[in-house]
Amino acid sequence: MPEPIPIKDHEKENRMVNKRLLACALFVVGITCALVGRMYFLQVVEFDYHSTISENNRLHVLPITPSRGLIYDRNGVVLADNRPSYNLTITRERAPDLKGELNSIISILHLPVEDRELFDKAMKQARHPFVPVTLFYELTEEQVALLAVNEFRLPGVDVAPQFVRHYPLGAHFAHSIGYVGRINEKESKALDSVEYRGTQSIGKTGIERFYESQLHGHVGYEEVETNAQGRVLRVLKHTDPIPGKNIILSLDVKLQEAAEKALGNRRGSVVALDPQTGEVLAMVSKPSFDPNLFVTGISFKEYAALRDSPDRPLFNRVLRGLYAPGSTIKPEVAIAGLDSGVVTAQTRVFDPGYYQLPDFEHKYRNWNHSGDGWVDMDAAIMRSNDTYFYDLAHKLGIDRLHDYLAEFGLGQKVSLDMFEESAGLMPSQAWKRATRGKPWFPGETVILGIGQGYMQVTPLQLAQATGLIANKGVWIRPHLAKTIDGVPPVDDHPMPNVVLKDPREWEQVNHGMQLVMHDPRGIARAAAAGAQYRIAGKSGTAQVVAIKQGERYNRLKTLERNRDNALFVGFAPAERPRIVISVMIENGEAGGRVAGPVVRQVMDAWLLDQNGHLKPQYAAPSKPPGYPHV
């Protein structure tokens, strides 16, 4: 018998449906209240906050990089300018697939795989939102065309025009002007993030670095409205950048070329100063390099070739080269002897070809092994007599010798605007105790009198010390900048003048240096032959490696890079100096024979006109009463 069909309980079903409807209604009401509450919180409570974020997503402040100041020589020849270039940039916020786009760029432009690592490194550098990152500099026309064709595949990638630094004369002024290069991570942290926003490069060496703040200028801004993809719709506000200041250097292009020609292919340096103003007229360090290689980033291969070259083209010999000065400092030692009263101009020393300290057997050899007999100060300077200056140094003692030579700037930085300059070394008893833990020995004073031993100087220091003799002790720091935006540089920490008890002693040493060049027995008379003006000079030949007692220097048995350095300092016209020159030729061996002619050629280039005649402004004045020995 079939089971009976149950009768539906309509009241129970109605109650269940009502409960479900009530639950749904409550759920809907709860959701509605939550949405309304959230809308109230966003639209009312946090209105200011979210409206600001929305406005920031729509409005952006973009930097406008200022144009870098130009650099000229003293005659208006452009030494550093700005050249238009097309660069590849990418804005991270506009690139949905950053890694994919970077890979596509490498493929489209057929770039080496190593550039992919450089792209990643560039993207990791700190930056502001929506500020483009430069990935590649100086695109070719073909590369610009390839990027234009593939623009649809590369959102956020742009070809941006930009000015980049350019050095028209290349290697000629690499060591004085220096160069700019890309801002690295360390520099980025130290720089003003506002002023350098959007700037890709900074001065790395030379004038470019020392006057970076003046050359850079001040950044400008554009307030722009963008769409959701970050593209600019309109410019709301524009503030022009302030360009960097132009700098006119004291360097002279023609004199620089003459100095380079005179130096030839030899390793060395030439620096020429105007003693009356301190202006650097020429500054040559050879070999040199092309600074344009560094502007947008030098390749690893090219940099390694420069860095590892045994000729050290990146090394600024004028400012950083440390050399024994040899006999070029004998005029300063003579000043010390005269002013201290240890000797007079008439004091004579007998030279048998060597010098011996009392109670010592060691012989300190004169370069002229046969000796010069009795010599006074004129003869000692003229013949570069080592024995005379051995004796004078011993009489002075290390303390007085150190103090006098330090007054001439030896052992300290002397320039006004050359940050790379080395201080050199002017040794003393205290220095030796502190660094070597040993006392000072009398023999070390003896060889210091001829510029050997521990002493190390730069070619610039030698030029300045010689300039002080030309300028009769008046200190004017050497400087490269003639004017900065029309204003001459100011020395905030001037050096005290070298004041002698008897000012006539300047003329005494000046006269001795003239005999070097113009006396029939002068050691550098060949370099002054036929000169239309009087030259005061002093040669120097400094040992690179020591020679044992009793042995003689033999160039044939000495490696080329171990041979003596050739040095020469001089100024002209001797009666009223307008140019001071310091020449150093590495392993040149003979200062008078090798470096002397370089000095003469540079002097001729400055003092003579195109027809080879002495310029009227450099003609010798009438000699004042009491002018010694002339």
Image (cartoon, rainbow, N blue to C red):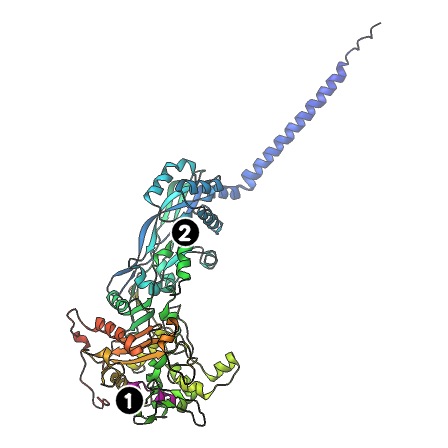
What segment is highlighted magenta in the picture?
381-391
Few, some or many C-alpha atoms within 10 Å of disc 1 (few <14, some 14-19, many ≥20)?
many
Image coordinates for residue 280, horizontal then vertical, percent: 30, 70
Mark 2 lies on residue:
198
- Quadrant position of residue 42: top right
Nearer-the-camera pick, 103 or 560: 560
Q: How many marks?
A: 2
Q: 302 or 546: which is nearer to us? A: 546
Image height check: is 182 above or below 567?
A: above
Q: Hey, which residue is sitting farthest top in the picture?
A: 1
The image quadrant that residue 606 belongs to is: bottom left
Q: Position of residue 57 (x, y in %)?
A: 47, 42
Quarter of the image containing the N terminus?
A: top right
Spatial CA distance of label 2 from label 1 is 65 Å
Q: Residues within 10 Å of mark 2 (few under 14, many from 20)?
A: many
Q: Which residue is mark 1?
A: 379
Q: Amino acid at mark 1?
A: Ala
What secondary structure do most residues of the magenta stretch adopt?
A: helix
Where does residue 208 sit, x and y in percent of width and height?
A: 36, 62
For the question of whether residue 97 can be seen, the reply is yes
Question: Looking at numbered disc 2 in the image, what kind of residue is underneath it?
Answer: Gly
Q: Is residue 113 above or below residue 290?
A: above
